[in-house]
Image (spheres, coloured by chain):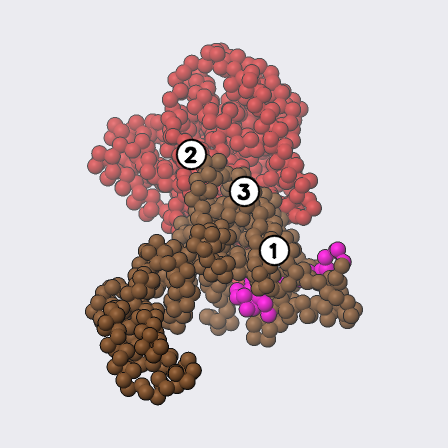
Chain colours: A brown, B red
Amino acid sequence: MAQWEIVIGLETHVQLTTQSKIFSGSSTAFGAAPNTQAAIVDLALPGALPVMNRGAVERAVRFGLAIGATINQRSIMARKNYFYPDLPKGYQISQFETPIVQGGGLTITLDDGATKFIELTRAHLEEDAGKLVHDLFEGQSGVDLNRAGTPLLEIVTEPVMRSAHEAIAYARALHNLVRYLDICDGNMQEGSFRCDVNVSVRPLGQTEFGTRREIKNLNSFKFMQQAIDYEVRWQIEQIEDGKKIVQATVLFNPDTGETRAMRTKEDAMDYRYFPDPDLPPLVITDAELERIRAALPELPAAKCARFASQYGLPAYDATLLSQDGATAAFYEATVGGGADAKLAANWMLGDLAAALNREELSIEQSPVGAAQLAGVIQRISDGTISHKIGKSVFEALWNGEGENADAIIDTRGLRQISDVGALERIVDEVLARSAAQIADYKAGKEKALMSIVGQVMKASQGKANPAQVNEIIRRRLG
Amino acid sequence: MSVWNPFATVAETKAALDRKQVSASELAEHYLARAEALNPTLNAYVTLDRDKTLAEARAADARRASGDTAALLGVPVAHKDIYLIDGWRTTCGSRMLENFVAPYTSTVVANMAAAGMVTLGKLNMDEFAMGSSNETSYFGTVKNPWDLTRVPGGSSGGSAAAVAAGLAPASTGTDTGGSIRQPAMFCNLTGLKPTYGICSRYGIIAFASSLDQAGPFARTAEDCALLLNAMAGFDPHDATSLDRPREDYTRNLARPLAGLRIGLPREFFGEGVAPDIARAVDAALDVYRKLGATTVEISLPNVKYSVPAYYVVAPAEASSNLSRFDGVRYGHRAERYDDLLDLYKKSRAEGFGAEVKRRILIGTYVLSHGYYDAYYLQAGKLRRLIAEDFKRAYEVCDLVMGPTAPESAFAFGAKSDDPVKMYLNDIFTICANLTGQPAMSHPCGVDDSGQHVGMHIIGNYLDEARMLNAAHQFQRATDWHTRHPSI
């Protein structure tokens, strides 16, 4: 049996975060009643004309700059002609020969820590179509044009991925990046980020590509994985059975986990692309380009490197904390609030992450703010409270039981007891009723000592400084 | 108002309103009555709506009473049925839109309403502005008021016939390849196609987006200037609209023509031009020379490619622009259909006429895979070459002149069986659409059969004021433009 190589390229439709549509003033908000966000231009009434939303252009440029691509400062909007009820003009305004973004790429990190640079072919601006509603009217289909004209950036890679893992790592990295750049909300359920995956296989060592099939509209990473796995198996089986792969567009059915051909190349349409005469060439001036470049946020890779060097974080922590903008900002605010950098990382990836997960909250919704978390960490660092008490202070803050760490520590009397005289009194009381443990300890059982420390901590209601307690006991028994 | 002269100019009408010799309501009533009486003969109007028009006229009178001094307050105007006006049926001369009532108003009509103009009605036209004789309208042919056996020209045939017959003092048209200038010649009117981008295309049903331009029909160049003042202006709803300050197109009307250099392209005076038309144009050029202009022969070697380039670009854009008429959201939908594809096929087969279908087919063909470079791309190169010809010409002349059309108004049916013959009627006008330059036609004589001849003036970009100045001075020295049919 031959060894097979998988070849994958992705086309991702990223919905841009503009308030209004790409060619009209209608709202792009999700979930409105059908056709309430479709006005003159969106309905393609006679005489209606498109006008380019510069906000969409700016977002495309931001993406291009972030991935080191060439920005075509003069790109062309083109008409892609075909009939369908969700396409009111009978053509989609897109870009064909000269897209706004060309080339560039992004680096992905695989599970084993290896990295790979994924080259992009292009990214172009276009409008979304509306959608058909089949379950509203008996025997008829409805058309909802709310989505028609929503701005999209279609991001196309070269066929450079060699496994489903790479494809998903790329999709995740892209998903991360577009949210980082604040050009897409990343909401996959609402269709803000959808992937078409081109898959082919070839015998290992063969240089020509095999015939590809395109899996359309995958809107979750899990489905992407399942779809690619199925498709690859199917293609290999076909070839090994002596059949030929026919170039086709396929749909993935999440219920069966299978892909099914929608149309083949034979019935491919002739879209009769031509430059849209209603829209002059899309020009981006040098000044605009510089303004957008200057306003670019620090990108995940750069931020990750800076976190590692500036805060001395291990690569793992730096990666996790720099993955999305809000988390990174929270981390830097916590450190800025006086928290030790490593402890802040531990808390955020530990207790805070667990609490957020438990209550299904995003970092922006955290009931404990960065300044509050910094307060908790500072009091642990300066010995005012133990790590364990710190956890309870954090819980109290989470539940809104106090303004800040100090207030909770004061009102609840949680300050650690470091006064030697006071600690010695508690230790002596405990030793007086621990004859058995003392005997064990003296017989060489270290564990017995821990039990005594535990008793002392309990007697002090957790406030005793455990290190000091340890030392006093050893001195008394030594 | 004693007895109103239906052939009064816009300037005269405005003056009478200003002097309170007539009210907007009286004017509206007068033209409505004439239209109601004569339209059955001429078929210039597709839609008249007495109530709407009179309500607008009363509103104009009220504005005037309250001290409003809008430039053309109360002057009636009729619009080609390609302009959307909120609440008015807008058919574009097609069965496809037979019952389509516009839900918004085009920018040009809104601008004219802001200037105080009162809508008299919607004017007949070739279907989707495709035609040179008004014979392709679903609503029947328009008769030329000068000779009811002849065509009024097209595609803005109703716009020309209505003004010529005194059913409106002025009208709007659109010009994609000569659709204002050729009917202006056939009906002895002055018609102007401004520089591409001067008038917003928003709310005007698109034929060929890169060529379409709105413009006025009137009796005089002065009227065209007044009307263009109202129509023009930057519109943020049209990305091809020119963002520049408004200008007063009447500002140069009174200038003497001494020193004006008129370029006469030898390509406009050669074979193909009827000799009696050439004679009328020559005589008119003598008038220009007497007024102080000089003439110089020039050459526009690439202008001969205008018709072939146009019949690639215009159908290509039209084939795409007309895709929205699919029977799904508005317009004609077939009564019975089997499935989605059948709905499209039947609705469009029934809704569009033969000429529209012909152009959709041509346009679809030239854009299809493998043909795009040979046709559409090539046509784009020709457009640039023609523009360069004119650029060179303007080094030695200020305006370019010649006959508006090679033949005068022809009889119904004379060309309707031969599309190419029909297309060649626009041989002189098309180049200005391909380059985007302003161009106009004004009455300059008659041919041997008594049909009217138009002088075609092409100007450099944004040079409307100079063109109107020339035509105005010509009209001060001649009376061709004052003639009207006895109807």
Going by the numbered disc 2, the residue's amino acid type is Asp
- Residue tagged 2: B243
Image coords of residue B459 (percent x, y): 51, 24
Q: How many marks?
A: 3
Residue A371, x across and y down, in percent = 31, 59
Q: Amino acid at mark 3?
A: Ile
Question: In the displayed structure, does residue B250 sit left or right of residue A410?
Answer: right
Nearer to us: label 1 or label 2: 1
* Image spot of residue A262 (x, y percent): 63, 65
Q: Quadrant of the C terminus of chain B?
A: top left
Residue at mark 3: chain: A
* Mark pair 1, 3: CA separation: 23 Å
* Mark 3 neighbour class, 10 Å CA radius: few under 14, some 14 to 19, many 20 or more: many
Q: Residue at x 23, y 65 (%)?
A: A407
Q: Nearer the viewer, residue A22 or A198?
A: A198
| Of pointers 1 and 3, the one earlier in the residue sequence | 3
Residue A196 drawn above or below residue B376? below
Depth order, front residue of B66/A363: A363
Residue drawn at x 55%, y 64% as measured from the top left: A218
Q: Amino acid at mark 1?
A: Lys
Mark 3 to mark 2: distance in Å? 26 Å
Q: Which residues are magenta?
A: A206-226
- Is-magenta flag for residue A210? yes
Q: Nearer the viewer, residue B419 or A112?
A: A112
Asked where in the image residue A233 lies, by quadrant, the reply is bottom right
Which disc, if any, is residue A71? 3
Question: Chain ID for label 1?
Answer: A
Q: Which residue is mark 1?
A: A116
Tell me whether the residue at label 1 lies in contact with that at label 3, contact meaning CB atoms closer than 8 angstroms: no
Residue at the extreme bottom: A436
Residue at 37% across / 41% down in the picture?
B110
